[in-house]
Image (tube, helix red, strand yellow):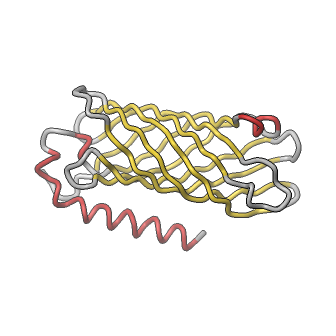
Amino acid sequence: MKRLIITAIVLICVCTVYSGSEVSARESDPFKFPQVGFWIGPVTPLYTTRDTVDTAIGGGLFARLNLGNSPFKLGFDGSYQKYKSKSLNQITMFPVYGSLLYRLPISSMLSFQLKGGAGGAYVKAYPINIAQWDPMFMGGAELSFPLGTMAAIGLRVDYLMIYEKHISGTKRNGHFLNTGLSINFNLDLFGR
């Protein structure tokens, strides 16, 4: 866990240094800044996963970096999700992943983004205390509205697929839908 936190901090620092060359593009578009933010909302199991765990409230943090002057962004996300289970007492999950976001070229104050990515999810089952990292894949969409030049508020929907079929005896993967309200802050480290 310590290594993961250190890696995330280094990646955020690299992202903010890289973004110094994009100052001119930011003058007219508040979504061209590197961003950090958080989200909170319901996390819902889907398909056969909903037979074993209940819907809960989750939340997470994210960081984003524009890739040059293109409509693409590189994102890093991490969240915390704790589910009451119908078969076990509780399941706690920490998904951590990278994603590529594409901003749709729609001329509006709203920003519409599609995203896809991969990473890992640390899953711990109680009371049997089994914990492991599983690979995961995600896809999603976001709608954001700027609050001036320094922040934005938005809605996000993420589908997470926790790949568990690689485990001996497992017959299914975990499927979750994260929806939430997000608030992100633009990092203007280099001035306008």
Residue ID at (74%, 43%)? 83
**Is residue 187 rendered to the left or right of residue 50?**
left
Residue at the image position 74 percent from the left and 60 percent from the top: 166
Give the total of numbered labels: 0
| Residue in the picture at 26% in, 41% down | 31
Please name the residue shown 67% across and 42% down the image.
175
Q: Nearer the viewer, residue 176 or 185?
A: 176
Most extreme residue toward the top, as rendered?
108
Position of residue 192 measured from the top left corner of the image (x, y, whole percent):
12, 50
Residue 124 image-quadrant placement: bottom right
Q: Quadrant of the N terminus?
A: bottom right
> Where's residue 15, x and y in %?
32, 62
Name the quadrant containing residue 141.
top left
Q: Is residue 26 above or below residue 113?
A: below
Query: Relative to 148, does residue 119 appear above or below in the rendering?
Result: below
Instruction: Decide: is 86 above or below 172.
Output: above
Q: Classify residue 139 as left or right of residue 104.
A: right
Q: Is residue 60 left or right of residue 192?
A: right
Q: Can you name the residue that lies furthest to the bottom here?
A: 3
Image location of residue 20, percent across then percent down: 19, 60
Picture coordinates of residue 121, whole percent (x, y): 63, 57
